[in-house]
Image (cartoon, grey):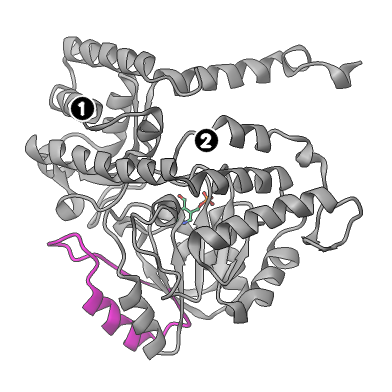
Amino acid sequence: MAFKQSLDEIDPDTAEAIDLERERQESTLGMIASENHVSNAVLEAQGSVLTNKYAEGYPGNRYYGGCQHVDTVEELAIERATELFGADHVNVQPHSGTQANMGVYFSVLNPGDKILSLSLSHGGHLSHGHNVNFSGQLYDVEQYEVDPETGYIDYDELENHAREFEPDLIVSGSSAYPREFEYERIGDIADSIDAHHLADIAHVTGLIAAGVHRSPVEHAEFVTGSTHKTIRAGRGGIIMCEEEFADDIDSAVFPGAQGGPLMHNVAGKAAGFAEANTDEFADYAEQMVANAKTLADVFNDRGLSLVSGGTDKHLVLVDLRKSYPDITGKEAEELLSDVGIIVNKNTVPGETRSPMVTSGIRVGSPALTTRGFEKGEIEIVADQMVDVLDNPEDEDVHSRVASTVERLCEEFPIYG
Ligand SMILES: Cc1ncc(COP(=O)(O)O)c(C=O)c1O
């Protein structure tokens, strides 16, 4: 009976693609800052029978019968996130970080309301009001930027901009800004003009959970995040908010923005949050930041230009224009990918090329740190990356780097 057969038997093409993807992850160095490898426990939770269950509503108050066990799972995820982040109220149902942001916008904004957020090419995210995203189409959005000299957010400019524009909501948080946000300052600016503050911690959820990065929870009515990046809790999103907004947030997520929650992903979040509340995870998060700083140190020593000069977190943003005026972000991504080092092209402040080409690469430490990489290995990888960029056409260099990548992958298996 087909129902009881394995994926391999029923759909060898999909099974093969999954095997190949596992093999690709094992045999390359994943340095995309928004990616990570989840534990076997999280994989197990996400691949469970919870995918079968409809559970519209919230624990104890569902539109479907048979929810007693998924209620337990959702309650565990909520309790653990509440403890990890010290939030008043947590909603673990958003399918993604973007849908978490949608939940916040739907809870306190009306179409046409004003949002002030970080510009995409200065490190912001599509869901913060870019015109190709619903957020830019529904709301009136203006953006703040980083100082072109320092690469740091210019908070005075942000404050003046906020006073002039009078937004209903200010968004802090980023995809490619390598520095910590001054959440308190942004919260004060928002308070002073009677705006809400949404801190989108998608990238730094794990760093904040582990206490190695400052938390916005005291300074923002709303905090959103992804659960699959630095926190390794499987693909999904999360919203935290002050108690007074709890009902608005819950109804903005369901029924406002979503139907049935993905309970298998909620189970992944529960398991991942349990892992995040351990000393082992705290050590991991500390190492992740130390590794990104090592990347920055090597890149700086080798003469690369980094946005803001370095990093406070798990990523560095390389501006290729000074050191490699003839190499675009797209070409750098391809050159590195050819030797097994996977990064993504990224726009940089003052970008003149298209987002599909770009003048930068974003390089992250989360996945390599999960593999067990420490200073020594990161130094090797960073040096070899620069060797490739310095010698874009030298096959000998490329094959030496590819061998090093192969050796490191074998020495530090992910699931093997
Ligand atoms: C700051 C920020 N917010 C939101 C998101 C969206 O997350 P998702 O891809 O889960 O929708 C991202 C993703 O990279 C992000 O960097």
| Ligand 1 has an atom within 8 Å of the beta carbon of the residue at disc 2 | no
Residue 199 in the image: above or below residue 25: below
Residue located at (14% from left, 40% from top):
297
Q: Position of residue 388 (x, y in %)?
A: 19, 23
Of all residues shown, which one is farthest toward the front? 279
Q: Is residue 259 left or right of residue 15?
A: right
Quadrant of res 413: top left
Q: Position of residue 224 (x, y in %)?
A: 51, 62
Q: Badge 1: few (under 14), some or many (20 or more) residues near its Cα, within 10 Å?
A: few
Q: Where is residue 331 in the image (x, y as percent from the top left)?
A: 28, 31
Q: Give the range drawn in magenta.
A: 143-170
> Dots 2 and 1: beta carbons under 8 Å?
no
| Residue to which mark 2 is pinned | 38
The amino acid at mark 1 is Gly
Residue located at (29% from left, 45% from top):
289
| Ligand 1 has an atom within 8 Å of the beta carbon of the residue at disc 1 | no
Task: Based on the picture, tell me whether residue 79 belongs to the magenta stretch.
Answer: no
User: Looking at the figure, which quarter contains the N terminus?
Assistant: top right
Residue located at (16% from left, 15% from top):
394
* Label 2 secondary element: loop
Q: Badge 2: few (under 14), some or many (20 or more) residues near its Cα, within 10 Å?
A: many
* Label 1 secondary element: helix
Task: Based on the picture, tell me whether residue 159 belongs to the magenta stretch.
Answer: yes
Quadrant of res 211: bottom left
What mark, if any, has residue 376 been given in the picture? 1
Residue 59 in the image: above or below residue 107: above
Is residue 24 visible in the rendered image? The answer is yes
Query: How many numbered tags mark residues here?
Result: 2
